[in-house]
Amino acid sequence: MQQFVGVLGGMGPLATVDFLKKLVVNMPTAVDQEHVPVLLYGDCTVPERNAAIAGAGPSPLPKLLAGIAFLAQAGVRAICIPCNTAHYWHEEMAAASPVPVFHIVRASAAEVRQKNPSVRSVGVLSTLGTQQSGIYRAALTEMGLEVVESTEEEFEELVLPGIALVKSNQLAAAEILFAEAAACLCERGAETIILGCTEIPLGMQHQLHARPAMFVDSTDALARAVIDFWRK
Amino acid sequence: MQQFVGVLGGMGPLATVDFLKKLVVNMPTAVDQEHVPVLLYGDCTVPERNAAIAGAGPSPLPKLLAGIAFLAQAGVRAICIPCNTAHYWHEEMAAASPVPVFHIVRASAAEVRQKNPSVRSVGVLSTLGTQQSGIYRAALTEMGLEVVESTEEEFEELVLPGIALVKSNQLAAAEILFAEAAACLCERGAETIILGCTEIPLGMQHQLHARPAMFVDSTDALARAVIDFWRK
């Protein structure tokens, strides 16, 4: 299975579908056999990541490591995880894997510079767990960038209800909330916004289409990183 | 992995994504953990099925059986294959599997009756290989239904170019061709049309939305069959 890329997915299920789609549509071919062969371990029963980071629920780590072990045992060439919040445990997963484990936060941060080399202030829309874990703040600060995050009120009224709407496949309703959450970040100086939760691009399809230069879609950034790796 | 459903996919890659999406959106839940855990063996390098059926290319069967063996060895509860043409080899795959292997043609034929119990004449849009294999003709004739298929000219000018457009992600362009191919079947008496190739629903999204009663989407029928099985 050396030609397969392993995907540890299911967090959430629709975000995994969106990732697999971006892995297909970003590949410049119309021939089935030239796409990336994928082994997806789509364990949607992994415990909720945000509750665990907040200390209010069981750790997802045992199930994440079970997925890594399965994919590694199968012999995949590399592993990717289309869930930002799960990257709180990236170090443990990478340590347990004999093959490279992509990092969605680093892929997204790199795309910020590629899209707009002169950017200074970057907004991040994410889950509360991702914000609390500080994984985007650390990566962007290290690059000399200012980070603009959602306030507690914006999380409660806009971002978290938007993510819940995506999880119930109400994408148009989610878009209204995410648009407002993005506008709040821009008002506080964000020049570019990372959609740092893989559910969020699903609920921002119109805005992504209308203003592609404004956003960095973490799902898309991870898919492009996998394609670059696979073509080398 | 007893709670996982195995998916033998990648034929083509975008059709597999569409199947996984339908497995999510047809499940009546907004909670990640209540979806179907999926193990996808997405081997897009399986040799082209139509050429093999026409005797003009290598058999995909060895790679199909490798996928079945991998999924069975992993311990999945059942296996599904979101590619109609690959069902030409269903008997061999089912014989090699210790767990049930869903049949997309039977799931689609059953949905014809569910949607419209009084239907007498059913059109089938499919690949040439699926038509040549006669898998839909056999299943529908056995149910006492008349079958309307595309002519050689309709295949060459409409259906096959439409499928090629889907494989290059030109969905709107595909829709024009598929609409005409469907109209040709209706002119010859089809009351309902089975989209008997998993690429076709991707290129008929507007028509599926506008006239849901007219079509049976084989991808959707397979996803619903898997969900029914999994919930029992």
Image (spheres, coloured by chain):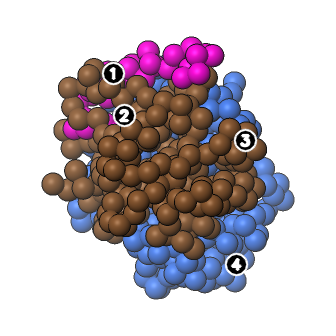
Chain colours: A brown, B blue
User: Dots 4 and 1: beta carbons under 8 Å?
Assistant: no
Could you tell me which residue is drawn at 69 percent across and 67 percent down?
B208
Residue A173 visible in the snapshot: yes
Q: Quadrant of the C terminus of chain B?
A: top right
Residue carrying label 3: A153
**Labels 1 and 2 within one chain:** no
User: Dots 4 and 3: beta carbons under 8 Å?
Assistant: no
Residue B186 is tagged as 4
Q: Residues within 10 Å of mark 2 (few under 14, many from 20)?
A: many
Classify residue B73 as left or right of residue B170: left
Residue A231 is tagged as none
Chain under callout 2:
B
Q: Nearer the viewer, mark 4 or mark 1?
A: 1
Q: Which contiguous range is marked in magenta? A: A52-80
Residue carrying label 1: A92
Chain under callout 3:
A
Residue carrying label 2: B68
